[in-house]
Image: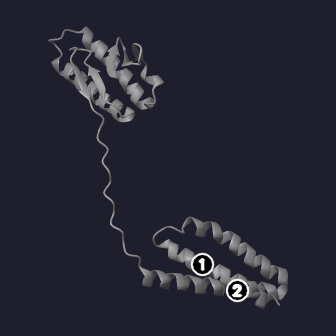
Amino acid sequence: MQLRANGERAVLVGHDGTARREVDPRRLPLGGELTDALHEWARVASVVGRGDPDTQPAARAVITRRGLQLAGRVAASMGVPVGYLDPLTGEERTVEPPAVRARPAAPAEPTPWLTGLTVAGTSLVLTVVTVVTLAATLADTNVLLGVAANAVVTAGLLPSLWLVRRALVWRWVSYGVGAGIALSWLALPFIVW
């Protein structure tokens, strides 16, 4: 694949197995911003190319540098080397896609069992005391209110517990509250009857 300027538009030229074809960058999965930048580069290169080559050396250098940058972005986006044909000098270069760097694996942290179990135990106790107290208070009015209170608390907390079950610190709170809800359901028959 090669990046070229054809008049005032950018094209990518490649061989499809039978012949060389020009493809508009808008037909490729490059994204709107990159495609617009390619066409803008081609328009500016066309304007600068119409002028006298000796009067605008700085502009010509900018066109070349920008074209190489855009060829690099196309190479990164497509994951293949992209040739670059300078529209002003006719010089050809190849731009390789950037090498993908693998992230170094983070060393595993030790599990803070003592602290985690302390947080889980505290969460368990607070949950059991709160839910059982609510159910007992409402069960004095009507037994069904005590059961409904347990159901509402359970339905309200379970989605949050599910979301934080793998977060490093909050998982311990999740374990404690989940166990507390289970214990409050086990205690419910003793409260309402």
Where, quadrant-wise, is the N terminus in this rendering? Answer: top left
Q: Residue at x 22, y 14 (%)?
A: 90
Q: Are marks 2 and 1 in contact (CB under 8 Å)?
A: no
* Image mark for residue 132: 2
Based on the displayed image, in which of its 4 quarters is residue 50 positioned?
top left
Q: Residue at x 84, y 86 (%)?
A: 141
Residue at the spot 33% in from the left edge and 16% down from the top edge:
5
Q: Is residue 69 left or right of residue 155?
A: left
Total labels drawn: 2
| 46 over 139 or under it: above or below | above
- Check the image and tell me how it is coloured: one colour
What residue is shown at x 36% (from left), y 71% (from top)?
A: 109
Mark 2–mark 1 distance (CA, rounded to whole Å): 13 Å
Which class describes the residues within 10 Å of circle 2: few (<14), some (14-19), or many (20+)?
A: many
Answer above or below: position of 7 versus 73.
Answer: above
What amino acid does circle 1 point to? Val
Question: Element under label 2?
Answer: helix
Q: Looking at the rendering, which quadrant does residue 114 occupy? A: bottom left
Sequence-first disc among 2 and 1: 2
Residue occupied by mark 1: 177
